[in-house]
Amino acid sequence: MSARHLESLTGLRVSRETFDRLCAFVELFEKWSKTINLVAASTQSQIWERHIVDSVQIFKLSPEPKQWIDLGSGGGFPGVVTAILLHETSSGWVDLVESNHKKAGFLRMALLQTGARGKVHSIRIEEAVQTLPAPDLISARALAELDKLLEFGFPWVEKNANLKFLLHKGRDYAAELAKARDRWRFDLVLHQSVLDEDSVILELSHLETLN
């Protein structure tokens, strides 16, 4: 993929240096994927179209330099990609939470080799709530149902009422929203995925518990 093609898909223009950092990340990902299951095997050959673009579109919704927490960072989507894109701003930060030590090792190497603006925390999310300050944004991809993600994030919301969630969801998002509304009240903006007409990014804010 070229930088121009990436821009045509996501609407986000990146510098040559940033695109080179994304390429370096892809190269590292492909190397580590031979020994560690970083994403579903069926999607490994579609890293640019399925994973990089998917991550860039979430960053585009809030490109200003901000503090992010990426939950269950796994193969680095969207956490590492967000941290690479923040390098252009020379500000903002991503705390990547990943309890799997092998994946955390990959994420640390990815941040080191790309000079991305982030840090890996190889701890459980419940521990991260106790140790990491409240961010401006929480992202997560293919980690858990919406209800559980909001449960994970709520302790940080109690510290920062303006915190927002940017969450990738697939075709079952409507059912997940309905279930979540049994426990939570929130403002919602629905963003259509540029990749799949059945997928969305949920932008949630002003989270409150109904209990």
Image: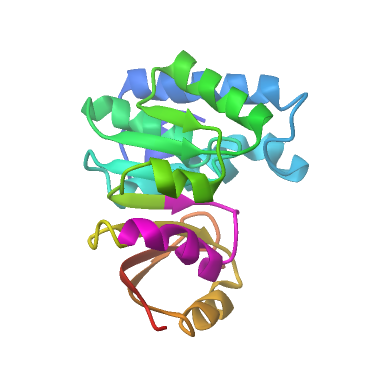
Can residue 176 be found in the magenta stretch?
no
Q: Residue at x 33, y 51 (%)?
A: 137
Q: Residue at x 30, y 62 (%)?
A: 158
Quarter residue 186 falls in: bottom left
Residue nearer the viewer, 177 or 191: 177
Can residue 156 be found in the magenta stretch?
yes
Q: Is residue 63 left or right of residue 25?
A: left
- Which span is picked out in magenta? 139-157
Residue nearer the viewer, 42 or 153: 153
Q: Is residue 176 above or below residue 144?
A: below
Residue 121: percent from left, percent from top:
49, 33
Q: Is residue 45 left or right of residue 49?
A: right
Residue 203: percent from left, percent from top:
36, 63
Q: Is residue 38 visible?
A: yes
Q: Is residue 9 visible?
A: no
Residue nearer the viewer, 84 or 5: 84
